[in-house]
Image: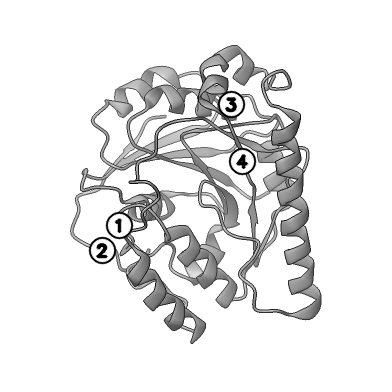
Amino acid sequence: MDKVTVIFVVYNRMSFLRLALSSLNNQSFVPDEVVVSDDGSQEDILSALKVFTQNMPFSIKYIRQSDRGFRAAKCRNNAIREASGDYLIFVDQDIVSTKNYIKTFIDNRCRGQFNVAYPVRLTEKQTEVLNITMVENAAYSDLITKKQIRKIHKQYYEDSFEYYIRKIFRTNSSKPKLRGGVCGIYKDDLLKVDGYDENYRGWGNEDDDLGRRLYRAGIIGKNPFYDEYPIHLYHLPFHDNGKRVNKEYHQKRKTEIDQGKFKAINGISNPLGNDKIEVIEIK
């Protein structure tokens, strides 16, 4: 059996991470290991984790880099380097999920393929109603609307269409799209493209870049999530009205990737900068 690591990227909002970890702890399939990778929080995430996770059944590793702005790509690479699992599942700290969400990743894992979900996006009011009891029991039926479920199903059908069109006709499409906080992939497949490109700093495009490089390397995406799904908690965005500060770099890299240069410029093997990265095994 493959060893499974779940990776959380965090920045403050320990209250959200508590809900996310509670959801993970009450899944029908729990991982062997959890890696919490911190993008330089001001909140004392480490102390909170030591208290909150004492009775959880998986090993937990905490990694921290200094706060130099939004650096999710580097933060994820820090976790990938330290993860001991064969199969990696990425879950953002603002994600809870239905009971068999992690199991769906495991049941559909396949080398040469990443699995990707599409989240229900809660409103501010829905997020205020959500509580720890609902999360521990995966009891969301009275919270989530039929319209929100229909959107999940619509995305499932769109992604499935793209998946089978690519399989049958060998198209060069980069769909289904990789969504970094709701995906699973074999570590070996990530290493083939050298993980995330750490030149993506600030919000936007690091997931698109990784997805395009994976497809160019022959690693394709699939969305197997119809009855099971992640649930995104409402919060104000980190970014400025969706402005993508990496747009020019992303356009440049798209051309290079299409020419076959699918390894990250600064990735797992060649990290950007000289940050001191803290690694602490909690349990």
Please give left or right for residue 123 compared with residue 71 in the image.
right
The answer to the question of whether label 2 and label 4 lie on touching residues, with beta carbons closer than 8 A, is no
If the image is split into quadrants, where does the C terminus sit?
top left
Tell me the number on the disc at residue 23: 3
Q: Which residue is mark 2?
A: 272
Q: Residue placed at 69% from the left, 46% from the top? A: 106
- Label 3 sits on a secondary structure element that is helix
What whole-number distance in Å separates the C-alpha atoms at marks 3 and 1?
Answer: 29 Å
Upstream in sequence: badge 2 or badge 3 = 3
Please give left or right for residue 82 compared with residue 172 in the image.
left
Tell me which amino acid carries mark 3. Answer: Ser
What whole-number distance in Å separates the C-alpha atoms at marks 1 and 4?
Answer: 24 Å
What whole-number distance in Å separates the C-alpha atoms at marks 2 and 3?
Answer: 33 Å
Q: Residue placed at 60% from the left, 20% from the top? A: 135
Q: Which residue is mark 1?
A: 201
Tell me which amino acid carries mark 1. Answer: Arg
Nearer the camera: disc 3 or disc 1: 1
Quarter of the image holding residue 171? bottom right
The answer to the question of whether label 1 and label 4 lie on touching residues, with beta carbons closer than 8 A, is no
Tell me the number on the disc at residue 119: 4
Nearer the camera: disc 1 or disc 2: 1
What whole-number distance in Å separates the C-alpha atoms at marks 3 and 4?
Answer: 15 Å
What whole-number distance in Å separates the C-alpha atoms at marks 2 and 4?
Answer: 31 Å
